Image (cartoon, helix red, strand yellow):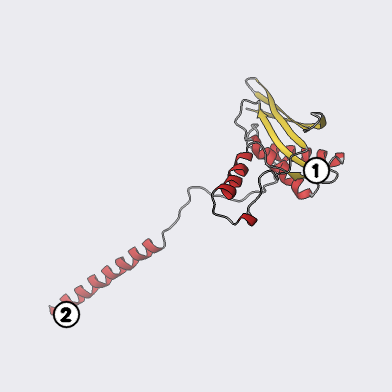
Amino acid sequence: MQRNFQRTALIVAFAASTLTLSACQNLSSPTVRFDRQVNYGDAKGVELVTNEFGSSDLQMIAEKMTGSLLETGIFQGRPTVTISTVKNKTSEYIDTTNVMNSIQTALVKSGKVRFTRSINEMQQGVDELQRQNQSGLYKQNTTAKVGQMTAAKYQLEGELTSIVKQNNNTKDVFYKFTLKMFDVQEGTIEWQDEKEIRKTSKK
């Protein structure tokens, strides 16, 4: 009788320790489950999920504008450029800043142009100058001097428009991205180009 009791006690103790160990393992190493399979795709691949503005459209616009600007030979002596407004005149929410960031990145990497702060970025530069010169926290010979910023020679302005036509079976979307570069001092257009994109889908 006593042996049976001892045997039962050992089984219960073993089961309890197994459960405790399992619980500790679950706490320290939680299992992550996914409801669907996720794969990395080619960032440069053509995206045709819908006929709304997408990543492929952004890349085509950036490549066209960058190539056109560099072919003109206007960037002699690495002039300074600033980005003004890029208006979205479509019915979609499109982050036009993202388009201009891709253009700016490619132009900077070319080594043929320098960019000054854009209108939207200028306040951050002003705040930093004030912090260095008015807070009293920095050695005077290490602070950036006020009035030493380089002004932009050229200014980029653009707009994105679209025309949408659809019937019961087909939807056609026509995008046009226009970019202009002005001489800031003279106010003249020194360069301008467009990229047109048409996307059609059928139900």
Q: Are marks 1 and 2 in contact (CB under 8 Å)?
A: no
**Residue that label 1 marks:** 79
Between residues 175 and 173, which one lies in front from this camera angle?
175
Image quadrant where residue 152 sits: top right
Picture residue at 78% right of the left edge, 41% below the top: 66
**Residue that label 2 marks:** 3
Q: Position of residue 49 (x, y in %)?
A: 63, 37
Q: Is residue 97 left or right of residue 11?
A: right
Q: Is residue 65 left or right of residue 203?
A: right
Q: Position of residue 183 (x, y in %)?
A: 80, 33
Between residues 99 and 60, which one lies in front from this camera angle?
99
Picture residue at 77% right of the left edge, 42% below the top: 80
Quarter of the image containing the C terminus? top right
Picture residue at 84% right of the left edge, 46% below the top: 77
The numbered dot on residue 9 is none
The earlier-in-sequence mark between 1 and 2 is 2
Q: Amino acid at mark 1?
A: Pro
Q: Amino acid at mark 2?
A: Arg
Mark 2 lies on a secondary structure that is helix
| Residue 33 is at least partly visible in this image | yes
